[in-house]
Image (cartoon, helix red, strand yellow):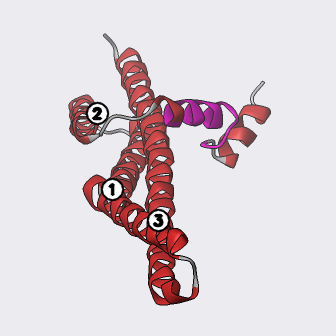
Amino acid sequence: MNRDELLESLRREADCIEEDATYTSKALFNAASSWGGRHYGLGISAIVLSAAAGALATLKHTMPEEIWSVALPLAAVFAAGLTTLVTFLRTADQAAARRELGNALNTLRNDARIFREIDCLTEVSEESLVNRLKQLSHRRGELNARTPGISKRAFDKTRKGIEEGESRYQVDVKKKKDEP
């Protein structure tokens, strides 16, 4: 294999790493957003129900017993249940972990892009380029191993967003328009 063929193979593989990192990071950001929404939705609901239980307890002497005797325990039980869910599911931690991995994959994507667009065009030795690509591939494997499952909904939203150009840089859009 001559140098040009090797460079083309290296660039193709770097492109695969970049594409994989783009899809996975965007899916993780979508999943993080969903977990964040659950965190706030459950947390705010628990706060409202706790406040309602407190208000009912304070005002129970001003309303019929058949109302507060049912509403007070229900509000308290549901507030406790929601609080338990937030604690058990660790919704804030789930969102943060997905954001962190998404950021790490974005860094990998950028490194793969620099490798493909710059490093492969310099007079670096073939051995050095192959080793650099192997490092990128190893990082991708490590990050993918740490990546939690991604829901179909988050993946579908990701695919739709990428197909609509959400992850495209304007310079790439310009470059494609300028190409013959």
Q: Is residue 125 left or right of residue 49?
A: left
Cβ atoms under marks 2 and 1 closer than 8 Å: no
N-terminal of the pair, mark 3 or mark 2, is 3
Percent position (x, y) of residue 94?
A: 33, 54
Q: Amino acid at mark 3?
A: Val
Q: Is residue 62 above or below residue 133?
A: below
The label on residue 133 is 2
In this picture, which residue range is highlighted in magenta? 154-167
Q: For residue 162, which numbered disc appears in the image?
A: none
For label 3, the SS is helix
Nearest the eye: 148 or 142: 148
Other residues around mark 2 within 10 Å, as few (<14) / some (14–19) / many (≥20): many
Which residue is pictured at 46% across the width and 74% down the height? 47
Q: Which residue is mark 1?
A: 85
Amino acid marked by disc 1: Leu
Q: Is residue 146 left or right of residue 122?
A: left
